Image (tube, rainbow, N blue to C red):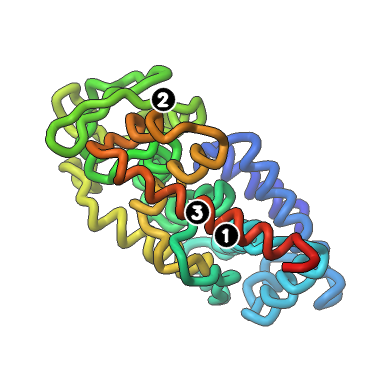
Amino acid sequence: MSLDLIRDWDAHLAHEKRRSEHTRRAYIATAERFCAFLSEHRGGAVDGPMLAKLTPNDLRAYLADRRAQGLGNASAARELSALRGFLRFVGGSGASVPPLRGPRVKKGLPRPVSPTEALALAQDVEDNARQGWTGARDFALLLLLYGAGLRIGEALGLTGAVLPLGETLRVTGKRNKTRVVPILPAVAAAVTRYVDACPYPIAKDAPLFLGARGGPLAPGVVRASVRTARRALGLSERTTPHALRHSFATHLLAGGADLRSLQELLGHASLASTQVYTAVDAAHLLDIYRSAHPRA
């Protein structure tokens, strides 16, 4: 029975959620592991009625089992997000998913959101959207913040004139300063998916990201969705839309980008504004050293 449910969910992800093949494979693998675990943990066949009666302890036991296999915090948060989507699908409209906070991220120095956490955050926001097209919209917007380092105001200031997205995007930032940022294929694909799903026409002189009634999307709507998702995933309270921009900068710096290039990509007027990321990256390296060095 569980195989039928998983196949149906896969079809739902492909045709209604329009998820990528890579995402579907990851989600389906999680559902299969979960059902295999439940068949031993609870005993008997895993079917809809059993899944509808799950408790937080069942999810907690599964995550504990996965953590014993070496699963990290970021991957555990992503698996929990996938399971919530699976259980909501199985239960249908009005389904009650056992509440369980994901693994918490330590507070302290500013920490970049990892690529896995950024994707889990965007996917959880999409999964919890009231309408399919608004979920696709929020997913595309968050990927744009993380993948191109935009401020939320810059992303919401984009118009339909940028369509179709190419390899680069011209952005107008603070003090009307313009810059050109590269666009990853995954980001362009997410924006295209949103545009195709949007029930309203997107004019060249109108906002690219529209609200539920067709007007401009308010930043508060995005922040509220992110706030709900980060709590569900157990991410730090510092995980905000703007934190995705910080992560973009930190990961580029860690990958070898020089400060001047990073300054241009972020649209900073002063190099001093960009240099803060060197401290964040140093803190990340120190974490790695402390966890790996036998004398640390």
- Is 63 placed left or right of 91 in the picture? right
Give residue 206's position: percent from left, percent from top. Answer: 16, 30
Q: Which mark is residue 209?
A: none
Q: Give the residue number, with chain letter if any, for mark 3.
A: 113
Residue located at (55% from left, 42% from top) = 254
Q: Give the residue number, with chain letter if any, for mark 1.
A: 81
Element type where label 2 sits in the image: strand
Q: Quadrant of residue 286?
A: bottom right
Give residue 250's position: percent from left, percent from top. Answer: 47, 45
Q: Earlier in the sequence, mark 2 or mark 3?
A: 3
Mark 2 vs mark 3, CA separation in Å: 20 Å
Mark 1 vs mark 2, CA separation in Å: 29 Å
Q: Earlier in the sequence, mark 1 or mark 3?
A: 1
Q: Which mark is residue 182?
A: 2
Element type where label 1 sits in the image: helix
Label 1 crowd bin: few (<14), some (14–19), many (20+), radius 10 Å: many
Label 1 vs label 2, nearer the camera: 2
Mark 1 vs mark 3, CA separation in Å: 16 Å
